[in-house]
Amino acid sequence: MHVLALIAGCACCFAVFLDAFQTIILPRRATGRFRITRVFLIATWRPWKAFAAQTSNNKTREQIYSVYGPLSLILLLLLWAMLLILGFALFYSALGTPFTDVMGVHTATGLTQFRTALYVSGTTMFTLGLGDVVPHSMGARTLIICESGVGLGFVALVIGYLPVLYQAFSRREVNIALLDARAGSPPTAAELLRRHGFEGGEEALTVLLAEWERWSAEILESHISYPILCYYRSQHDNQSWLSALVAILDTCALLISVLEGPASRQAQLTFVMARHALIDLGNVFHIQEQRVWADQAERERLPQKDFDRLCDVLGEVRLRLCGDKASADRLHTIRQLYEPYAGALSDYLGMPLPAWVPVVKDKDQWKLLSKLRTEAEAGGRPGGGPISGRAVRAAAFLHDEHDH
């Protein structure tokens, strides 16, 4: 029994050390199908997702989804700590539980002795040092010193891990929030191109795509190293890192298939990096091995009616798509390079993909502000006075488009 306890203790501690090293310290994608973190996420995410799916209210469902990321992080750290405590308790059991307990448990056998070993392991891991259980062998004293060091190191890793994680999350969300004013909420490729249909808009769009090329590289670096960030939702229900990434890919696909010029060349660079991030994140969750991957072939993100609406929007910014069959064919070919991966990730994470064209809203703040700007340039001031009544009404619902 002592040999089995020693082997089981080594297995528990080694599994935690290896998983913590790959998850926190190693700056690359973790490998191994039976890692603690991967098994934990698989075992908890699917029931959590199924529970959230029972809720018909979108706001409530998104709130349930948003809790999973931070909660799973806390539970994962707790699981690591419990496995370490169990592993060292098995080491003490392998030594015959050589402790003198003030409660007189040293003369007991079996389960009572193992409870004492668990107690010693727990108090040592968290460096309580109560002194009510005294070891009376050099092996036990050595193990207690080692476990105390492991406990201190575990606390230090957690303290260093959390700020890095939340800094990566914060950097991710800044660009997503900025995209709201440029591509709508939720973001769409058609709206992004329409809002850049002004003089100098092509240069501004090139700069924007360059920023998103870097953003995609940061997502690739941070979310591969810390995949738990993929479960973290954005602050607004109609925004997500996945919908933003796909909207940028849609925009790049349109520019590559229709345009020639600087914006198209930058679109190619951004497309390659964004697609790289999308595919690698799918590999982290082994999306290609799941049934949902095969289901993507039967789905169509751009049905004919949406394609016709897309043509109308692109016509406003002088981009010909419907009148050029070669452009439409190129767009379809490019879409097949990333849409299956995006759809599979969308189904797995419960994050809806953006449409190609925005839904028409009664209160479109962009159209309203554009109209007010046009009136200002023409010298018009409706309603009289320094602040027009139209401007007051605009300010009253500028945030209606957002879902706080």
Image (cartoon, rainbow, N blue to C red):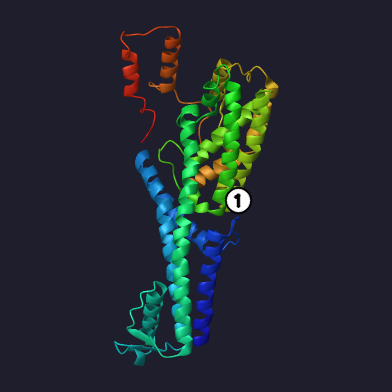
Q: Quadrant of the C terminus?
A: top left
Q: Residue at x 51, y 31 (%)?
A: 355
Q: Give the vertical position of 122 relative to 40 (above or below).
A: below
Within 10 Å of disc 1 (Cα), the crowding (few <14, some 14-19, many 20+) is some
> Quadrant of residue 59 in the image?
top left
What residue lies at 48% left-to-right and 52% top-to-bottom? 165
Q: Position of residue 311 (x, y in %)?
A: 58, 20
Q: Nearer the viewer, residue 380 or 314?
A: 380
Image position of 230 with respect to 336: above or below: below
Q: Is residue 328 visible?
A: no
Q: Secondary structure at mark 1?
A: helix
| Identity of the residue drawn at 58% across and 52% down | 284
Q: Which residue position holds label 1?
A: 283
Q: Tag 1: residue type?
A: Asn
Q: Residue at the spot x=40%, y=55% of the render?
A: 71
Q: Position of residue 37 (x, y in %)?
A: 51, 60
Q: Position of residue 362 (x, y in %)?
A: 38, 21
Which one is nearer the viewer's eye here, 106 or 27?
A: 27
**In front of the other: 275 or 353:** 275
Residue that protrudes farthest toward the left in the picture: 103
Q: Is residue 165 visible?
A: yes
Q: Which quadrant would residue 130 be assigned to in this image?
A: bottom left
216 relative position to 367: left or right: right
The quadrant in which residue 296 appears is top right
In the image, farthest residue toward the bottom: 107
Q: Is residue 205 left or right of residue 333?
A: left
The answer to whether 208 appears left or right of 180 in the picture is right
Q: Position of residue 346 (x, y in %)?
A: 51, 42
